[in-house]
Structure formats: structure tokens, C-alpha cells
Amino acid sequence: MKNVNIFIGTVITLAASIIISNSALADWTLDAGNSNLSYGTIKNGMIGESNSFKTISGSIDDSGHINIDIDLASVDTQLELRDERMRDIVFKVAGNPSAKLSGDMSLQAHNDQEVGTSRVIEATIGVELVGEKVDHDVMLVVTRLAENKVMVTPHGVIFIDADDYDLLDALEELRVLAGLDTIESVVPMSFYLTFTK
């Protein structure tokens, strides 16, 4: 479930960036140092935790195609044992080292967006994780920070369901190993993604 959240978060960001491309078409590159993907998990019905991925990369090309990679081995749950369990049980990084985000957006609609302004857009992004690909309809806020820089954030709260990626068995295994009563399968995700060109 954490994987799903993070992936979707990344996908949404990329889509937004694409839309903001200016008339001088060129690839938008993710500025990982000024970007973050986080997801929340809830256990035992009341204990919340924040998690993220340390390594993400990608770009949006001049034709509007989004291509983002999330290094699943870089998951950071703030506890090494949890990181290890996420890598081995949920992500199965030996056979699935990365999550993929893809999609295509029109580059024309937002060419005139002024620096310092934000716009809300709709996007459909494909998220590929542990062998499953699911399309997600999302709402994003795209803020133009400079002529060559944009930031994308969610419009409202985004919720991801682990069941969409056949991860319920993996979550159950985590629950048993951690000695928990419950681990929620639907989780909130947040992010800010910065792109430059």
C-alpha cells in the first residue's frame, strides 16, 4: 500500500509538469533534491506513520510523455527493520527494483501560465508496481516557479488502495510479523515535485 501511494504521488507530479511546458519545447527533468514523495500508514486503527522514498528520477519529454522511476530499495520508514520488510515482502525489490510512472499530456494548454501562478489540472497516470499497472485519475496543482521551473502538488488528499495492486497478502504478512491487530490498506499520499529545464 505504501508503494502504491508513493508511486501515484510521483506520477501526478510528472503529469502536471508536462502541462506547464513553455512554447520552447524541451525535456523537463525532475529536480530530486527539491522534491519529496511521502505516504502515510495507519496501524491498529490509530497509530499513524510517515514514510517516503529517498531516490526518484525522471523527465517529461518534448512530446509530453512522462517517464518516472522510483527506486523501491530507497524506501525510508524511519526504521531499518521496517525498511527491510517493505523491500523484501511488499516491493520484492530483487525482482521489482523500481516502480514506473507513465502517461501523456498536452503541452499546449498551459504555455501562457505566468511565473508565480498556480493552476489545477486533471490527469490520468499509469502506475506500474510489482508487475501490476493501474491508471489513476488525479487532480494536481501546478505552480510555475520560474520560466524553467515548475512544482506539482496534489489538489486535496490522495488515497491509494493496496488491493488495486494485489498487495493485501503482503500487508497481512507484515501485520503478523509486526504483531499488529490491523494495518489499513487504504492510505493517504502527499508530495511536492519540482521540474526544471
Image: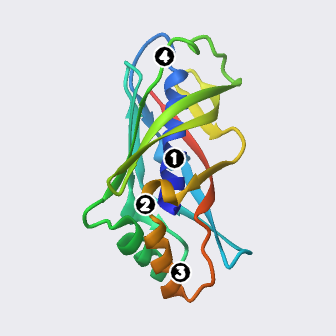
Spatial separation of the CA atoms under disc 2 and disc 3: 16 Å
First in sequence, mark 1 or 2: give its number: 1
Quadrant placement of the C terminus: top left
Q: Which residue is mark 1?
A: 8
Spatial separation of the CA atoms under disc 2 and disc 4: 34 Å
Disc 3 on helix, strand or loop?
helix
Q: Nearer the viewer, mark 4 or mark 1?
A: 1
Q: Amino acid at mark 4?
A: Leu
Q: Who's the residue at 44% across and 71% down the image? A: 169
Label 1 crowd bin: few (<14), some (14–19), many (20+), radius 10 Å: many
Question: Residue 175, which numbered label?
Answer: 3
First in sequence, mark 4 or 3: give its number: 4
Would you say the residues marked 3 and 1 are in contact, meaning their CB atoms lie under 8 Å apart? no
Would you say the residues marked 4 and 1 are in contact, meaning their CB atoms lie under 8 Å apart? no
Question: Residue 107, which numbered label?
Answer: 4
Q: Which residue is mark 2?
A: 166
Spatial separation of the CA atoms under disc 4 and disc 1: 21 Å
